[in-house]
Amino acid sequence: MIWKYRAVNNPIAKRKWLSFCLILLVVGVCYAVYKYSITGNLRFTLLSLSFFSLMVFLYTIITLGKIRYYYIDGEIVYKPFKTPLSNVEDFEVDYENKVIRLKLRKPSIFAVKTLYFESDEDLEEVARFLRRKLGKI
């Protein structure tokens, strides 16, 4: 089973990526202020800050518009990393935000914990599949 989503069409994913990019901008501004306090060269600092801000802005546009794919191959959920379905203890479906949150037996940094969706049909199909696999019918 394969489905796709774009972060711009999912409110939770959009909030996650926008907050990440905002943190990048704040770090860049803090570094620019620090660099200005040390060097005193305002022209170079503003030029560097504007270039960095442009790069973060372009990164944000590309990240929000990029199509991401998930797929479940028998017993494993793939995103960029793998999570075996035997590790999934329970799951919670959020229809309003089009998200399925997986509760894992052994949490890992690289495990898929949240499944994002663009359409309600894909959300329903994956929720039915997970209920069937976990015996919650």
Image: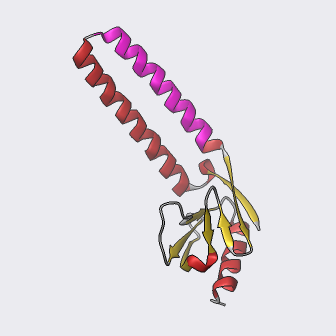
Q: Position of residue 8 (x, y in %)?
A: 60, 48
Picture quarter with the C terminus? bottom right
Q: In which quadrant is the N terminus drawn?
A: bottom right
Closer to the camera, 35 or 18? Answer: 35
Please state which of residues 109 and 45 is positioned toward the viewer in this rendering: 109
Left or right: where 61 falls relative to 109: right
x and y percentages locating residue 114 in the rendered image: 55, 65
Q: Position of residue 92 (x, y in %)?
A: 54, 76
From the viewer's perspective, is 1 left or right of 46?
Answer: right
Q: Is residue 52 above or below residue 3?
A: above
Along the line of sight, the residue nearer the viewer: 11 or 101: 101
Q: Is residue 54 magenta?
A: yes
Above or below: residue 29 compared with residue 135: above
**Among the 4 quarters of the image, the one containing residue 115:** bottom right
Residue stretch rendered in magenta on the structure: 41-63
Residue 93 occupies which quadrant of the picture? bottom right
Q: Position of residue 4 (x, y in %)?
A: 71, 57
The residue sitting at 69% across, 85% down in the picture is 132
Question: At 66% from the left edge and 68% from the top edge, which residue is drawn?
Answer: 77
Q: How many marks?
A: 0
Chief SS of the magenta region: helix
Res 70 → quadrant: bottom right
Q: Work out which residue is located at the far right of the displayed protein and give it.
A: 1
Q: Is residue 60 magenta?
A: yes
Seen at 38% across and 30% down, the residue is 28
